[in-house]
Image (tube, rainbow, N blue to C red):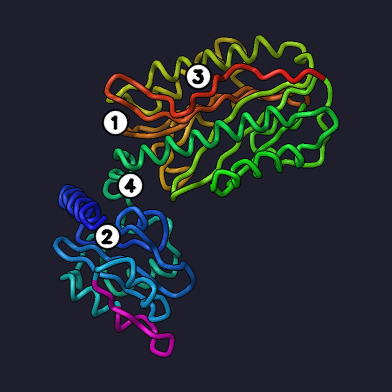
Amino acid sequence: MKTEIAKRLAALREKMKAVEADLVALGPGSHMQWLAGFHPHADERPCLLLVGPEKETFLMPVLNAEGSREETAIEFHTWPDAEGPNAALAAALAAIDASAAKSVVLDETMRADFALLLLGALPGAKHSFTDDTIGALRMRKDTAEFKKLKMNAGIADRAMQKAFASIKPGMSEIQLAAAIKDHFSSEGATPQFWIVGAGGNGAFPHHQTGSRKLQEGDAIVIDIGGRKDGFPSDITRMAVVGSPPEGYGQIHSIVEKAVQAALKAARPGVLAREVDEAARRVIEDAGYGKYFVHRTGHGMGIDGHEPPYITSTSETVLEEGMVFSIEPGIYIPGRFGIRLEDIVILRENGPEILSTLPRDLHVVRA
């Protein structure tokens, strides 16, 4: 792990040099986790990983220092509650030759008061966020990251199969979600989300799973994910109780064609918006454009949603090793919704789907 951290620090410094950044400041969260291999408990006490052109250090609350020392060999500048962080921050910046930093990269997810504390210690410094530095590095997954994502995709596949096997007329969305959560837990994964939208509820892309009973003719959107070994999963499939509602088969076919178009468009060197355009064009040409109300996909790594975002405006150039979802959908108000989602990793010749579960409609005989 120490070797991996050293490689990531070196890669980050190359990015800093390219964008002429004097300092990168990260709060407790996924950026810090990726770079340092851990992050301390996040609370209101300022805690920062500060990376300069040649040295790095932590601004660390005393309360977290002992436990954090077991996780890292990076130098600490600690501060107790009785004194506050200002003096320790000044010492930390001096230790990495960043007291006069003029260009600071801020972790966009850190607390605003942490950011203002740092900027207050560096009057006149310009700030930006991590898109061109650690964010760019995180978008390309290494072999170890891929293996964990692939393992989680397998767990999600089996959780989805458990959902299919559990569907019975008369059960509630919540009861079906419970079966899904139980399966994630049975494989040592923490359930993260469980969208079960039956009938008209499926027309709400982020429906809050509720008490509605499953009944004959319901098309059911099942969008689920868990987390194990620090990485997540995310998959959406469709099921129906008995006979599908009128028009379902045609619309399912359109959404599948949109998935296929996005998969075909996703290649290294292509802009992310071109993948969104490929999926959206299929749906628009079929006359359902106004019913596709969200982006085509999102990146996935340590975070369930992270760059690259597959949107109609994204200028991100896709690169080999990027992991993202492809999940077009059509949502017919009052009737049903259809979303088909797979997570892919971009290879030299195109996307590799992490799931092995077909996107076909699963029919439950009532």
Amino acid at circle 2 = Val
Q: Quadrant of the N terminus?
A: bottom left
Closer to us: mark 3 or mark 2? 3
| Mark found first going from the N terminus, 3 or 1 | 3
Q: Residue at x 37, y 38 (%)?
A: 147
Q: Are marks 3 and 2 in contact (CB under 8 Å)?
A: no
Q: Residue at x 65, y 9 (%)?
A: 250
Which residue is denoted by mark 4 in the rendering? 135
Q: Which residues are magenta?
A: 75-88
Labelled disc at residue 319? 1
Magenta stretch holds residue 79:
yes
Q: Is residue 66 visible?
A: yes
Q: In the displayed structure, would residue 24 be above or below residue 286?
A: below
Separation of marks 4 and 3 at Cα, in angstroms = 26 Å
| Mark found first going from the N terminus, 4 or 3 | 4
Which residue is denoted by mark 2 in the rendering? 24
Separation of marks 4 and 2 at Cα, in angstroms = 11 Å
User: Is residue 188 left or right of 113 when viewed as pictured?
Assistant: right
